[in-house]
């Protein structure tokens, strides 16, 4: 289990980030097109503090969030306490606390950036999926501009084509999604970029965002700061036909 460098240590700033992301709902639109979870059982792997669980619960039969980090698990429990169809459990991607063939959708967001090495988690997802169910991995598109360029500056050995090839070899289809992040003001934007990047890269990114938002004019709190961010949505469906023992 690798610590998450942002939400584990800065959950309040990460809450700001979650609320800023994908304000136009493009990722949710693509997810619904690929695997409508209405009336189905959903598992959110690495659910963090449970931010996405209520959205799934709007139409799902049941929703379970799995998270390894106890402080985040407690935050998730508080978030979903009033939602009877939602639960959270402690666990890791490579050892999910669920029986075989018990869910219809496995969702993991910003958890599988590096591709090679995540095979145990992919196998576990297949184990808990029912035939015909879907595994959906949502990750930031490290080949996109400008956010991906900032990520590459902090991760010089990251190989975007190699990661894409890994998921293709694992049987995933990939949809690239362009989204828009919107912050209430400059301070919120700076707080988020400072937890996502090293200090030099964050400083450069903040300056670039300010230039892109009228060179910093009108950036008083409440005026809004926007940032384009690309994502990859990897989708793999479990065969619904003959399932061999051990598959």
Image (spheres, helix red, strand yellow):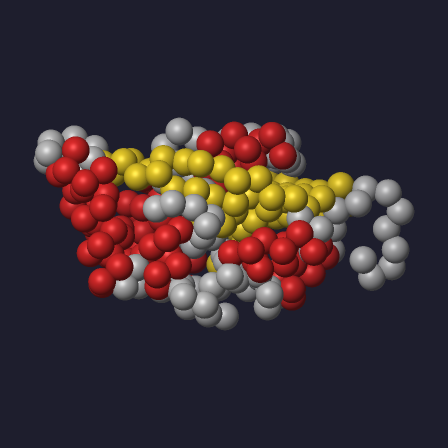
Relative height, residue 132 to residue 113 (above, below): above
Q: Which residue is drawn at 83% across and 61% down?
A: 246
The image quadrant that residue 154 belongs to is bottom left
Q: Position of residue 13 (x, y in %)?
A: 26, 52
Q: Is residue 56 left or right of residue 122?
A: left
Q: Determine the residue positioned at 23% across, 38% down.
A: 212
* Placement of the C terminus among the 4 image quadrants: bottom right
Q: Which residue is drawn at 39% across and 59% down?
A: 152
| 100 lies left or right of 190 | right
156 w.r.t. 142: above or below? below
* Residue 77 on image: x %, y %: 42, 51
**Figure check: 244 above or below 119:** above
Quadrant position of residue 214: top left
Q: Closest to the observer: 126 or 147?
A: 147
For the question of whether residue 64 can be seen, the reply is: no
Looking at the image, the residue that sits furthest to the bottom is 1
* Residue at point 56%, 49% (across, down): 137
The answer to whether residue 167 of the structure is visible from this angle is yes
Image coords of residue 186 (percent x, y): 16, 42
Estimate the x, y position of residue 239 in percent, counting from the top left.
Answer: 79, 45
In the rendered view, tell whether residue 24 sits above or below residue 195.
above
Q: Which of 190 and 45 is in front in this view?
A: 190
């Amino acid at each position: 289990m690798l610590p998450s460098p942002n939400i584990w240590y800065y959950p309040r700033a990460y809450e700001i980030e979650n609320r800023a992301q994908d304000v136009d709902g493009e990722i949710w639109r693509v997810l619904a097109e690929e695997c409508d979870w209405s009336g189905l059982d959903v598992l959110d792997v690495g659910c963090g503090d449970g931010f996405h669980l209520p959205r799934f619960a709007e139409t799902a039969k049941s929703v379970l969030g799995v998270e390894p980090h106890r402080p985040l698990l407690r935050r998730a429990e508080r978030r979903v306490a009033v939602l009877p169809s939602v639960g959270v459990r402690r666990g890791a991607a490579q050892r999910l606390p669920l029986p075989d063939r018990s869910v219809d959708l496995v969702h993991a967001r910003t958890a599988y950036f590096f591709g090679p090495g995540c095979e145990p988690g992919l196998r576990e997802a297949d184990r808990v999926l029912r035939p015909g169910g879907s595994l959906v991995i949502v990750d930031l598109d490290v080949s996109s501009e400008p956010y991906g360029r900032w990520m590459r500056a902090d991760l010089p050995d990251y190989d975007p084509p190699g990661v894409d090839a890994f998921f293709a070899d694992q049987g995933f289809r990939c949809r690239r999604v362009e989204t828009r992040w919107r912050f209430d003001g400059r301070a919120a934007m700076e707080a988020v970029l400072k937890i996502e990047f090293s200090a030099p890269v964050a400083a450069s990114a903040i300056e670039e965002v300010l230039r892109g938002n009228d060179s910093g004019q009108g950036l008083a709190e409440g005026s809004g700061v926007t940032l384009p961010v690309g994502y990859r949505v990897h989708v793999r469906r479990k065969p619904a036909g003959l399932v061999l023992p051990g598959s």
